[in-house]
Amino acid sequence: MSEIRFRTMIGMMLALGVLSAATPTRAERLIVSVSNHRVTVTPNYSGEELVLFGSVEKDANTPSTRTAYDLVVTVSGPRADMVTRRKERKFGIWINTDYREFLKVPSYLALFSNRPFDAIASPEVERRQQLGLNNVLLMQRVGPDYADVVPNDPFRSAFVRLRSEHGLYREETSAVTFLTPTLFRTGIPLPAEVPIGTYDVEIKLFSDGQLVTRTETAFDIVKVGFEQFVATSARQNGLVYGLVTAFMALMTGWMASIVFRKD
């Protein structure tokens, strides 16, 4: 073996050793599932609640002193661009005076935990791990720039409030229940106007204020029946869908003129 090859192999072994030392060995892992991975929306859909359940699995590397855990579940729906407008009353009428565009933000966002976020971790960890609606990044277009702003920004506050009023943004700090020290469950409420698409679920496990491990799962919300046919037609055949819609509107107006015509 040449000296060059020998030195190369030694270098690779040292690099692997450094990587192994830098990567912490996980002492726990999360096993989770949801009660339904495919929610169907029909014309009479009025909302429902899924159940997330799981367990904390320990191994030989788990410290014997680690007996209590905290859990934070973040559910985020399909992302989209949204606009929040500011209205003011002028000359007796309400008009739009300003607006803020939110870029690729979750259409549905829910954060659940077993106790208040500030009791789970320090403010720095809360911000870094995005615990709570005030710490979730909601990217905005602010003039020529793109950034998130302080939680009490009026546009951000109005955006979160309006989504919350429709049940699409929520934060509940007593929604996760530990059935045993390692078994847990929580409900995921889905309102009637829940958006269609894939929902990502991120579960974070904390102990003594620090993140121990995390895992992810997902579920889909889909339309079925006539609503799905209309949505698919509008997406795949926009021109035909528009022409048919216009024709139906003309026919409806013509029939109404005949029914209510006064001779």
Image (cartoon, rainbow, N blue to C red):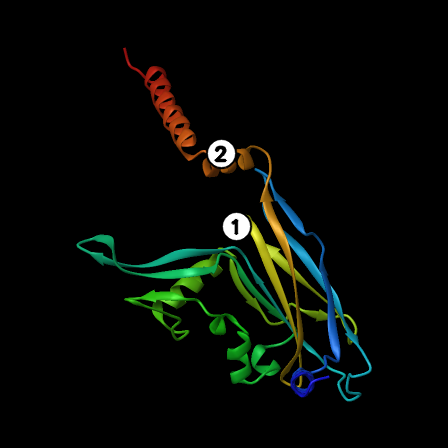
Q: Residue at coordinates 63% horizontally, 83% vertically from top-left?
A: 210
Residue 165 locus on image (x, y percent): 47, 58
Kindly identify which numbered label has been placed on residue 15. none
Q: Which residue is at the far left?
A: 91
Marker count (numbered)? 2
Circle 2 residue: 233
Q: Residue at x 20, y 53 (%)?
A: 92
Residue beneath the point at 59% across and 83% down: 121
The part of the image, by quadrant, that contains residue 28 is bottom right
Under circle 2, the secondary element is helix
Q: Quadrant of the C terminus?
A: top left
Q: Amino acid at mark 1?
A: Pro
Q: Earlier in the sequence, mark 1 or mark 2?
A: 1
In the image, taking residue 170 as reference, residue 188 lies left or right, namely: right
> Based on the displayed image, in which of its 4 quarters is residue 212 positioned?
bottom right
Crowd rating for badge 1 (residues with CA inside 10 Å; few <14, some 14–19, many 20+): some
| Dot 2 alpha-carbon crowd within 10 angstroms: few under 14, some 14 to 19, many 20 or more | some
Q: Which mark is residue 195?
A: 1
Q: Is residue 191 visible?
A: no
**Is residue 218 toward the left or the right of residue 141 in the image?**
right
Type of amino acid under label 2: Ser
Q: Nearer the viewer, residue 209 or 163?
A: 209
Q: State the image coordinates of residue 164 (x, y, percent, origin top left).
A: 48, 61
State the image coordinates of residue 262 (x, y, percent, origin top left).
Answer: 28, 14
